[in-house]
Image: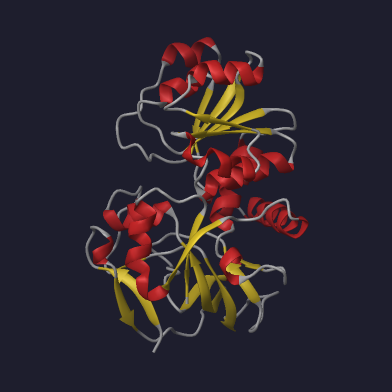
Amino acid sequence: MPRHVEFEQTGGPEVLRFVEAEVPEPAAGEVRIAVKAIGLNRAESLYRSGTYIIDPVFPARLGSEAAGVIDAVGPGVEGLAPGDRVAVVPAFSYHDYGMYGDLVLAPARAVAKLPDTLGWVDAAAVWMAYVTAWGALIDTAGLRAGETVLIPAASSSVGLAAIQVANRIGAVPVALTRTSAKAAALREQGAAHVIATDEADLVAEVERITGGAGARVVFDPVGGPGFARLTAVTATRGTIIVYGALDPRETPLPVGQVLGRSLTVRGYLIYEATQDDAKLAAAKAFVLDGLVSGDLHPRIDRTFPFDAIADAHRYLEGNGQIGKIVVTM
């Protein structure tokens, strides 16, 4: 009997439970996938704990990113067939689909065929990170060759993807991390510069790197009181993309900095790209081309077996990882 993970109340990883249930035939526009690997994302921890931007509807499913083999296709699905190796792109609500299962349904438009060279673990680690980075940096902020982008929380899977996306177009990625413990790994992943914000003067370092101009783009998943320092190092008419709130404290908006340098501060979620057919197609093309060329290559921090999904969530919340956490079947 197929198994999936759900939860009946918000809380810590201990609320996750396995349920055995038949998975129906795919409806029109859907495919059914025999899952080989699942990519974990911070939003899933927030959703499970009741602190995400939408509240769970119980019993609640989890997961927006998986890789596997198509088992069946629904009416009207074109270009996909049983036996295809695919990955699921986060392009739907947790209320509608969940990828934490060994046999799952997914909307066909959210599925991408995989290059033959991409293994299951890497395939499950691609789409949330790279589409978020592409959508925010390229599609929204218009980052260009030669421009500097600051990347707080750079050791996350999205942070590492942003470094690679910036390098792919010839921009200058500057990784921000709290201490120097992860600095060498970030340089190995392609960061042109690394700033340990608890050990160095952020403003002075960015001025040195940019010749006093500041960063044209800032890509921030943290928020909180430290946000004020980011506005101080953003270039005139620069853009700050906020795509998360890892720091639960209030985020100040230094109005003087924003007005004085004509800054744009903008929220971003991956669904801006994945719920628009044209943008989704462009994102898939950019990412797949980058995977084939080798410019984009996910870093896997650690894998867990499906039976240890709660332990994988605990590890995710420990914030010690550099790259993606993947659960294997």
Q: Residue at x 63, y 84 (%)?
A: 82
Q: Where is residue 275 in the image (x, y as percent from the top left)?
A: 55, 54
Q: Colour scheme in the image?
A: secondary structure
Q: On the rendered structure, is 115 left or right of 159?
A: right
Q: Where is residue 76 in the image (x, y as percent from the top left)?
A: 63, 77
Locate the N terminus and report the quarter of the image it occupies. bottom left
Residue that lies at the very extreme toward the right in this rendered image:
293
Foreground residue among 40 and 200: 200
Q: Which residue is drawn at 43% across and 59% down?
A: 93
Q: Residue at x 58, y 57 (%)?
A: 127
Q: Residue at x 49, y 85 (%)?
A: 25
Q: Is residue 110 visible?
A: no
When asked about the image quadrant of residue 89, the answer is bottom right
Against 217, is 15 above or below? below
Foreground residue among 236 and 147: 147
Q: Is residue 237 visible?
A: yes
Exactly how many numbered labels are in the figure?
A: 0
Q: Position of residue 65 (x, y in %)?
A: 51, 63
